[in-house]
Structures are given as structure tokens and as C-alpha cells.
Image (cartoon, rainbow, N blue to C red):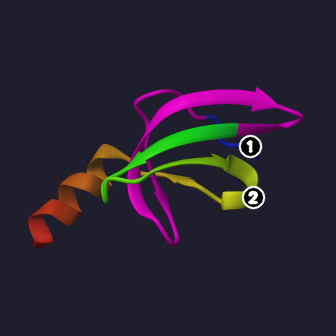
Amino acid sequence: MAVSFKTGDRVVHRLFGKGTVSGVLPISGDIIVTIDFDSGKTKKLCAYIAKLEKVNDEDEASSDKKI
């Protein structure tokens, strides 16, 4: 099942961590996603290859409470 992304979605990448989607470009059966990571870096990644996962609000809230 393909995951869709839109501007403003929170995502997590296994190397770059959490970030916010700032752009989406569908191309050749994949999606190029521009992400502003919490570390301050901005990356353009193919969603399928990068295996991005959406982070829901409940995950964010529970991780904030653990700190």
C-alpha cells in the first residue's frame, strides 16, 4: 500500500530523523518529497526508496512526554 504525503506532514527517516514535508512532486510512480528536518537540514528524497514513515500527532506527544 502506497503512502501519500502532503505539505505539513510530519515524517521520520532512519538516518535524518524527524522532519516536516515542505514540498511534494509526484514523478514516475514515486513521490519526490522535500523535507525540512528538525536538525536544520533540508533534503529531497524519493518517498519509496527512502522508506519514509508518517509520524502521527499521538507519537509526537508521547515522545515529548518521555523527555
Query: Residue 49 — which label?
Result: 2
The secondary structure making up most of the magenta span is strand
Identity of the amino acid at label 1? Ala
Q: Nearer the viewer, mark 2 or mark 1?
A: 2
**Which structural element holds mark 2?**
helix
Seen in the picture, residue 27 relative to 3 is either above or below; the reply is above
| Mark 2 crowdedness (10 Å alpha carbons): few <14, some 14-19, many ≥20 | few
Residue furthest out toward the front? 41
Picture coordinates of residue 19, whole percent (x, y) = 39, 50
* Residue 67, magenta (yes or no): no
* Residue 9, magenta (yes or no): yes
Point 58% across, 34% down: residue: 5
Point 32% across, 53% down: residue: 40
Picture coordinates of residue 28, whole percent (x, y) = 89, 34
Location of residue 44 (image quadrant) = top right
Left or right of residue 56, residue 65 in this image: left
Q: Look at mark 1 in the image and give the residue it sits on.
A: 2
Distance from label 2 to label 1 (Cα)?
12 Å
Left or right of residue 44, residue 28 in this image: right
Left or right of residue 63, residue 30 in this image: right
- Part of the protein shown in magenta: 5-31
Return the disc, 2 or 1, that comes first in the chain's sequence: 1
Residue furthest out toward the right? 28
Point 64% across, 35% down: residue: 4
Location of residue 24 (image quadrant) = top right
- Quadrant assignment for the C terminus: bottom left
Point 37% across, 47% down: residue: 56
